[in-house]
């Protein structure tokens, strides 16, 4: 009788310092009952990876669960698997930081659980061979990747029942391919079907059925808590495995020692297939989805998988400039970390947490609180470097070929973009560790087509006896009202954006971003004169012909105040409407008051020379002052994003437009100041 070796592993992670309610829910619905159940079946061997932050959160705040974890570790049930402590994408950080993050988690496991990991979990299963020397330098001997990594690199499906060897510069490591079919089977299939799915991997007594997947599937995903615990799927599964003579549970490191490699493998720079889709621009994502459907499942599974694929994970830095900015601000400090103190180094490692840098099924970059946390860690680093005298530098932080002006005062971290109109792209308080310029642009996402053109799902959730649907194939209910929220911006949503229009603006045209722009300043490069602290563009107004127009912005800085002197000169002699756009992020946009008035569905104020935005979260106010009377249009900008439950409307920022008329020339002085409430 053939006997399959079951290598069962689970991965658990929450974004660093995620909302307490979110972590508590995961503890209650998933992590707690999972380890409580596993303790009853300590003879079942399995692997666990946890981000260090989450494991320490459990140890500190949920000692009962940690006792279960300790018990299972001492009994030899759990094999601990390593990775970066704060769950970074290893290929997206430096070699130095990889080793530090991996070593930090390994040291934590050794100190608190007396366990030394030999394997590595890859965050979001993002593979690049360049990480091999760093993993081996940290004492790790194997990595778990997806079978898709192998299939997309030309391997055959029937070869995925063991491990392979790979190398980089002569440093070797073992690669275990996680079975996609088992990931989709457990815990969603019935017990009988789950057991058969495992047994079907047995081609010989050397065969391994390899699964390593998110623990959140076991209780936190929609419908799974009831299925896994209330209906006792997990208990029944463990009992069935332990009773089945065809299955032997085994640790990865044990299998590595007792079984030979299946050969040599070099893998593509890739993650799982869906990640490759998500990293593409929306039209490319839709084209890939259409191509995959057109060739059919059989062709794709039997060869097309090696030819039809999406982008690489780092494409997210191209797809989302907001993600790229956070990442490149991190790499800036990573390169010069020798100047940082211990606490700032820890903030750097927290800043490397992956969740905020990408977006797929889960909120990720679209979640303001995750971006707020990232900027909190960034500003902790900046605060450690701030001096009494402002530090001013001009260099290409974003690695996009255009320089940014960075000003670090005693109280503020400020950045301007030369690529985009000398605009304000970062406005962070070193006191409150909050970036009011943490904004997001409204983009077309491929999944918006499900809202714009809903189609009935072919798949239906299985019956309770047979299993439940996963979030990848469960039916999603679409709220028709979301269609009206699908508005797309044609320029990044920074601040100090210069607009020129022949017709007057309206609140509606501002909301929908469909006013007719006649200038070329809102999304074009400006030249920077460092001696004058001035951004300037020789551009034009376009009305039947081009009218030469120049626009300049000179900046001045105080501890908590930014001053701007704006000048426009145009050959167009008729009346134009100039508008300066601000986009300011707040933790609670709906609670912000503008001159004592709630923004609500939008407000219009006339003859405005100054406004005060009161922020309940930071207990600060932002004061914007103009030297001329303007008309103010303001609204709360929402995005429509996808999550594990369907779609959600997220308030990202307050957008403001200050408009006034002029002819031929305009001089305007304004300031942005942080005040106490």
Image (cartoon, helix red, strand yellow):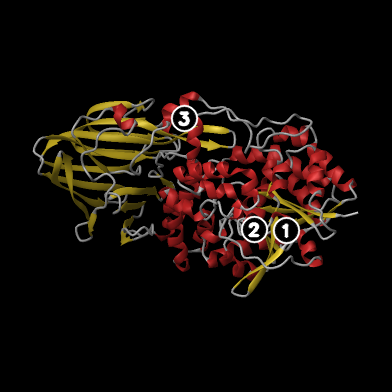
Residue drawn 59% across the image and 74% down it? 169
Q: Assess whether mark 3 and mark 1 are in contact (beta carbons under 8 angstroms).
A: no
Q: Is residue 489 left or right of residue 14?
A: left
First reached walking from the N terminus: tag 3 or tag 2: 2
Quadrant placement of the N terminus = bottom right
From mark 3 to mark 2, how far is it between C-alphas? 36 Å
First reached walking from the N terminus: tag 1 or tag 3: 1
Please rate how many residues cluster around mark 3, counting C-alpha atoms within 10 Å: few if below 14, some from 14 to 19, many from 20: some
Tell me the quarter of the picture where residue 156 sits. Answer: bottom right
Please rate how many residues cluster around mark 2, counting C-alpha atoms within 10 Å: few if below 14, some from 14 to 19, many from 20: many
Residue drawn 46% across the image and 24% down it? 481
The disc label shown at residue 150, or none = 2
- Rendered location of residue 133, percent (x, y): 60, 70
Residue drawn 47% across the image and 41% down it? 368
Say whether residue 10 is visible: no
Q: Assess whether mark 1 and mark 2 are in contact (beta carbons under 8 angstroms).
A: yes
Residue that mark 3 sits on? 452
First reached walking from the N terminus: tag 2 or tag 1: 2
Please rate how many residues cluster around mark 1, counting C-alpha atoms within 10 Å: few if below 14, some from 14 to 19, many from 20: some
């Amino acid at each position: 009788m053939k006997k399959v070796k079951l290598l069962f592993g689970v991965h658990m992670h929450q974004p660093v310092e995620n909302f307490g309610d979110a972590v508590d829910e995961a503890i209650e619905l998933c992590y707690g009952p999972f380890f409580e159940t596993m303790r009853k079946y300590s003879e079942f061997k399995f692997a666990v990876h946890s981000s260090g932050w989450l494991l320490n959160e459990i140890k500190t705040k949920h000692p009962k669960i940690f006792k279960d974890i300790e018990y299972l570790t001492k009994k030899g049930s759990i094999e601990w698997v390593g990775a970066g402590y704060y769950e970074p994408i290893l290929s997206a950080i430096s070699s130095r930081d990889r080793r530090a993050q991996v070593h930090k988690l390994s040291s934590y496991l050794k100190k608190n659980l007396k366990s030394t990991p030999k394997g590595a979990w890859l965050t979001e299963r993002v593979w690049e061979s360049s990480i091999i020397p760093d993993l081996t330098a940290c004492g790790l001997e194997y990595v778990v990747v997806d079978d898709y990594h192998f299939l997309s690199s030309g391997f055959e499906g029937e070869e995925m029942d063991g491990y392979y060897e790979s190398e980089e510069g002569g440093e070797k490591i073992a690669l275990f391919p996680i079975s996609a079919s088992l990931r989709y089977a457990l815990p969603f299939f019935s017990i009988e079907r789950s057991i058969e799915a495992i047994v079907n991997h047995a081609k010989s007594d050397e065969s391994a059925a390899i699964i390593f997947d998110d623990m959140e599937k076991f209780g936190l995903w929609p419908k799974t808590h009831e299925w896994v615990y209330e209906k006792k799927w997990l208990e029944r599964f463990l009992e069935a495995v332990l009773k089945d003579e065809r299955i032997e549970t085994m640790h990865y490191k044990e299998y590595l020692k007792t079984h030979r490699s299946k050969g040599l493998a070099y893998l593509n720079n890739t993650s799982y297939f869906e990640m490759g889709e998500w990293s593409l621009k929306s039209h490319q994502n839709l084209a890939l989805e259409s191509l995959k459907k057109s060739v059919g499942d059989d062709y794709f599974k039997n060869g097309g998988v090696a030819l039809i694929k999406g982008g690489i994970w780092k494409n997210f830095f191209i797809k989302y400039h907001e993600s790229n900015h956070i990442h490149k601000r991190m790499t800036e400090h990573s390169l010069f970390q020798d100047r940082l103190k211990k606490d700032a180094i820890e903030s750097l490692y927290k800043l490397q947490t992956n969740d905020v840098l990408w977006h797929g099924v889960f909120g990720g970059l679209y979640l303001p609180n995750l971006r707020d946390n990232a900027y909190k860690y960034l500003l902790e680093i900046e605060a450690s470097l701030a001096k009494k005298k402002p530090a001013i530098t001009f260099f290409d932080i974003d690695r996009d070929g255009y320089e940014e002006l960075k000003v670090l005062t005693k109280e503020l971290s400020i950045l301007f973009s030369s690529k985009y109109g000398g605009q304000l792209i970062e406005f962070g308080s070193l006191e409150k560790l909050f970036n009011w310029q943490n904004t997001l642009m409204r983009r077309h996402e491929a999944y918006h087509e499900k809202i714009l053109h809903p189609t009935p799902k072919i798949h239906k959730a299985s019956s309770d006896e047979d299993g439940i649907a996963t979030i990848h194939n469960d039916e999603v209910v679409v709220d028709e009202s979301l269609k009206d929220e699908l508005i797309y911006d044609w320029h990044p949503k920074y601040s100090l954006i210069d607009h020129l229009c022949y017709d007057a603006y309206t609140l509606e045209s501002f909301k929908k971003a469909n006013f007719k722009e006649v200038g070329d300043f809102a999304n074009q490069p400006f030249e920077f004169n460092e001696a004058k602290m001035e951004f300037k563009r020789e551009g034009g107004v376009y009305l039947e012909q081009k009218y030469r127009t120049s626009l300049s912005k000179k900046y001045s800085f105080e501890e908590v105040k930014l001053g701007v002197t704006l000048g426009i000169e145009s050959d167009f002699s008729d009346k134009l409407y100039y508008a300066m756009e601000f986009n300011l992020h707040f933790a609670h946009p709906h609670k912000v008051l503008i001159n004592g008035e709630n923004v609500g569905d939008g407000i219009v104020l006339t003859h405005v020379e100054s406004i005060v935005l009161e922020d309940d979260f930071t207990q600060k106010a932002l004061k914007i002052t103009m030297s001329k009377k303007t008309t103010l249009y303001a609204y709360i900008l929402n995005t429509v994003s996808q999550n594990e439950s369907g779609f959600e409307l997220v308030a990202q920022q307050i957008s403001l437009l200050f408009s006034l008329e002029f002819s031929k020339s305009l001089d305007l002085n304004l300031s942005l100041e942080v005040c106490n409430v």
